[in-house]
Amino acid sequence: MRLRQFAILLVAALPATSAEIRIDHATIAGTSLDTLRQAFTRVTGIPTEYGGPHANHASEMAIVSFPDGSYLELMGIQKDADPKAVAEHAWSLSLRNNAGPCAFAVQVPDVPAELARLKAAGISAGSTEHSGRLRPDGIKLDWETAGVGPGRRGSLFPFLIRDFTSREARVYPTGKATTRKYSGISRVILGVRDMDAAIAQYRKAYDLPSPRREHSSELGAEVAWFDGTPIAIAGKARPDSWLARRITLYGESPVAFVLAGSSEAATGKSKITWLDEKALGWRLGVD
């Protein structure tokens, strides 16, 4: 078995608990997929791969996959989208407003079992939904997902995903990582209204120890992160800050993603270099 295939199977087999939380993918939403793709390549120098339209008749995506099996999903509105489908899309507001970071997912081997575990821990969780998309080369992808926690799917908590077809076919459209410049998605930064409540929810859901905290001048907020996980929580923002305004508009949800600049995932305090937000249209960092 090839090393990449082994890595993907290993990620899929890991339970989503404690330090074993692994990002499956993170979604960036905008009105025009072409615009998102061009801006990403212009800022990072990394090409994107068109992944095809979703079966919802609303959105289409392009992918930037990494060696660790995680990927960024650039999502825009289909050119011939059904207006009703767009309006009913879970991330409709983010798509229509070019919000950028809007959701993230974790891969689990058994979605119903993980939903039952979370519910037993006192975390609200939804039901499974079947979905998929057709790749440009005609390969059909099928999976099931489920939302966790309050708000839109993949907002405060990652949504769950399990593949029925090959996960490698979903992650690597051409059979290999889009880039090796970065090893994967090392961190998801969540903007929240009530930092202490969000921390308590995560600790309850994943049996986590107390997080470490620091003030971020870049975010204009306090940031807490759980060692050994990709989860960082930003809160207690200044009322006039971009973070406070974003939370008012989109609710508690991802506000930035961070890529790992080496093969080692971020496990503690590290210096994040932020890419050109104005040119990119959203916040992306590298640690």
Image: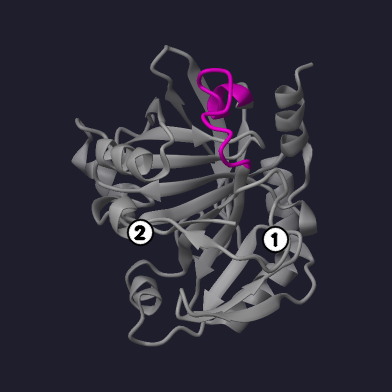
Does the magenta run of residues contain 178? yes
Does the magenta run of residues contain 177? yes
Quadrant where the N terminus sits is: top right
Indicate left or right for 14 with 187 as reference: right
Q: Amino acid at mark 2?
A: Glu
**Mark 2 falls on what kind of element?**
helix
Chain-order first, disc 2 or disc 1? 1
Residue in view at x 63 percent, y 62 percent: 231
The residue to which callout 2 is attached is 277
The residue to which callout 1 is attached is 119
- Say whether residue 122 is visible: no
Quadrant where the C terminus sits is: bottom right
> Crowding near pointer 1: few (<14 within 10 Å), some, many (20+)?
some
- Residue 20, given in percent of the width and then of the height, sits at 77, 51
Query: Does 76 sit above or below residue 245?
Result: above
Q: Nearer the viewer, residue 176 or 287?
A: 287
Magenta-colored span: 168-183
Residue in view at x 76 percent, y 77 percent: 210
- Say whether residue 47 is visible: yes
Query: Does 225 sit above or below residue 4?
Result: below
- Residue 150, given in percent of the width and then of the height, sits at 52, 66
